[in-house]
Amino acid sequence: MSLLKRLKARQRRKTLRVRSAQQSRGEKLRISVFRSLNHIYAQIIDDSKGCTLASCSSKVLTDAKGSKKEVAKQVGLALGKIAVSKNLNNVFFDRGGALYHGRVQALAEGLREAGLSF
């Protein structure tokens, strides 16, 4: 197996491990996080229906200024406000195999500041 295939397989196992540990706790909505080199994306997904209920990204926020961590926190605040207004409180945080560090952690803090608890 080539190096690239092994790395992709390892990342996939990590993602599924994080997701399955949380989903076994009951029927909750999932906050999925994806971070690219320049942007961060987050969405609230209902896996039982297979649909996205709310989403936000650093591309959508036009007034987001500062470092990448500060922008990630602003994305978390914006998504948290949307979730609270739609009464989507029963959620869990799916970091998608990424470490809970840096931008991912800042996004989670923004979600908590907006009123979500997970």
Image (cartoon, rainbow, N blue to C red):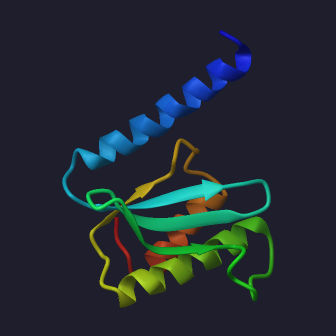
User: Does residue 34 lie above or below 63 as drawn?
Assistant: above
Quarter of the image that includes the C terminus: bottom left
Where does the image place residue 27, in percent across and percent down from the top left?
21, 58
User: Does residue 47 lie above or below 59 as drawn?
Assistant: above
Taking the view exactly as shown, the residue that stands out farthest to the top is 1
Residue at point 68%, 80% (across, down): 60
In the foreground, 30 or 106: 30
In the foreground, 70 or 14: 14
Quarter of the image that includes the N terminus: top right
Residue at point 19%, 53% (across, down): 26
User: Does residue 29 lie above or below 87 as drawn?
Assistant: above
What is the total number of numbered labels drawn onto the structure image? 0
Residue at point 26%, 61% (across, down): 28
Residue at point 65%, 60% (across, down): 103
Answer with left or right where residue 5 lies relative to residue 105. Answer: right
Residue 93 figure quarter: bottom left
Residue 107 figure quarter: bottom right
Residue 36 figure quarter: bottom right
User: Does residue 18 lie above or below 9 as drawn?
Assistant: below
Answer with left or right where residue 99 lies relative to residue 68. Answer: left
Where does the image place residue 11, in percent across and percent down from the top left?
57, 32
Where does the image place residue 77, in percent across and percent down from the top left?
54, 81
Where does the image place residue 46, in percent across and percent down from the top left?
33, 63
